[in-house]
Amino acid sequence: MEDLQSALAARGLTVSTLPEKGRCLVTTRDFSSGDVIISQEPYASVPNNSPVSSRCDGCFASSNLKKCSACQVVWYCGSTCQKSEWKLHRLECQVLLGLDNDKRKSITPSIRLMVKLYLRRKLQGDQAIPATATDNYSLVEALVSHMSDIDEKQLVLYAQMANLVNLILQWPDINIKEIAENFSKLACNAHTICDSELKPLGTGLYPVVSIINHSCLPNSVLVFEEKMAVVRAVEPIPKGTEVLISYIETAGSTATRQKALKEQYLFTCTCSRCIKVGLKEDIQENAILEGYRCKNDMCKGFLLRDSDNKAFICQQCGHVRDKEEIRKIASEVKSLSDKASISLSSGNYLEASSMYKTIEQLQMKLSHSLSVNLMRTRETLLKILMELKDWRGALHYCRLTITVYQRVYPAIHPLLGLQYYTCGKLEWLLEETENAIESLTKAIDILRITHGTNTPFIKELLLKLEEARAEAAYKTRSAKSWD
Ligand SMILES: [Zn+2]
Ligand SMILES: [Zn+2]
Ligand SMILES: [Zn+2]
Ligand SMILES: [Zn+2]
């Protein structure tokens, strides 16, 4: 702990304890928007491999993969990654080879993550690989496990998983109860590793990053550069402030956010957004995000339940919507959504696009125009139309989602930046050069803060903007020469 404190002090950080939250990370100097607060390689990590999709264990790349010829479980993109992972995989490979074929191939990413965690601990214990102040097993021991809050069913599952890990490792002095507790630690502390566009690639345990608590309106953001976790300030953070990131998708009502945090992370959020629960402002916000629209087409009002719970009343014009009428449309949306998601997951994009368009029409009758549910349908339509290479249609939905993103996310949020980026790319494809320049500029203004300026991802974005500017300048010149 002392070692950790001095390593953090050099970065302008300290670990403090708050009575209601436990450990937290606090700044000891001022940070500017876009500054890296902390970065960390994982203590252990695994790609989300499945029988249908695989990634390199070293860098999570998905192309040019070769299987480890001995165990046939782990994939590598080449000898560089294989070498960098070898010290640990050599041990893993041995224990995997002790299993019969079927069992070896059925090992899930979570089981592998735990096996790798123990192997890394062993390697550091044997001093085969170095341990440092920010990279050692005692940091894993210090993580919260919330064992007393977990229900019986989950405990049984963790015990079964722990038995499997024990069976794989076959170490005489291993503590099965401790493995089970570590599964609980992973559930509330491990992070989903995403690419620059926030697509999930794998899971990693970052014990120092895990000290950072959650807020639904955070001052920092967690992104990944390959497997490295990078936390950046999204607003100026003065000395003496708690560093906060968001553990969940924050576009949702207070009840939805609180439910997600309780279910996965087992705590009740008391952030600056959540403490407003029950206040007029919060009720109005929730009714817009997840509630219904006014029957009057011209009215943008939001609806609240009447006192005997039979209808919803527009708070702006007083129009009444019958509960039964709402229920009917909602159940139609539900049954269509089930079918649509099946045709989407089977890759039937044409059918899926027409189904989601019908859902969109129904939701436009049902939900407020700024509702999250309608936004989700439009995000899905955007993805489908991109698959179908319908750039015009995709741009239409991209722009509609941005209108809602601007409301539900803070001004500096990676999802808003990425959506501007998509918008800019589509405008570029459709030769709307001026619009593309505007969208790409907005994307850069956000993503240079959330993602830094040095990654290949941002460099590519900057290059696209340059290209669009050059094209615009060329068009202006040739237009002039025609005058
Ligand atoms: Zn690799
Ligand atoms: Zn192997
Ligand atoms: Zn909150
Ligand atoms: Zn109204």
Image (cartoon, grey):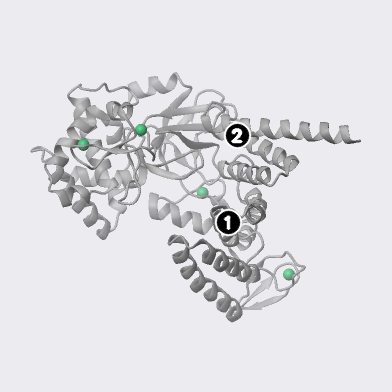
Estimate how packed mark 1 is, as few (under 14), some (14 to 19) or many (20 or more) residues with alpha carbons within 10 Å: many
Q: Quadrant of residue 123?
A: top left
Q: Amino acid at mark 2?
A: Leu
Q: Which of label 1 and label 2 is nearer to you?
A: 1
- Kindly identify the residue that appears in the image at 61 percent across and 80 percent down: 325
Residues 29 and 246: in front is: 246
Instruction: Name the kind of residue labelled 1 in the image.
Output: Leu
Q: Position of residue 80 (x, y in %)?
A: 32, 26
Could you tell me if residue 266 is visible in this image? no
The answer to whether residue 229 of the structure is visible from this angle is yes
How packed is label 2: few (under 14 Cα within 10 Å), some, or many (20 or more)?
many
Q: Residue at x 32, y 41 (%)?
A: 144
Separation of disc 1 and disc 2 at Cα?
22 Å
Taking the spot 16% from the left edge, 41% from the top edge, the residue there is 96
Q: Looking at this rendering, what residue extends furthest in the front direction?
A: 482
Asked if the beta carbon under badge 1 is closer than 8 A to the nearest atom of ligand 4, the reply is no
* Between discs 1 and 2, the one toward the N terminus: 1
Q: Which mark is residue 385?
A: 1
Between 320 and 360, which is closer to the camera in this rendering? 360
**Would you place residue 215 above or below residue 89 in this image?**
below
Nearer-the-camera pick, 244 or 38: 38
Q: Element at badge 2?
A: helix
Looking at the picture, how far across and down is residue 28, in whole percent?
Answer: 50, 24
Considering the numbered disc 1 on the image, is that residue within a helix, a strand or a loop? Answer: helix
Residue 376: x, y in percent? 56, 58
- Quadrant (top left, top right, bottom left, bottom right) of the N terminus: top left
- The residue that appears at 46% across and 25% down in the rendered structure is 13
Looking at the image, is 385 positioned above or below residue 172? below
Left or right position of 471 against 231: right
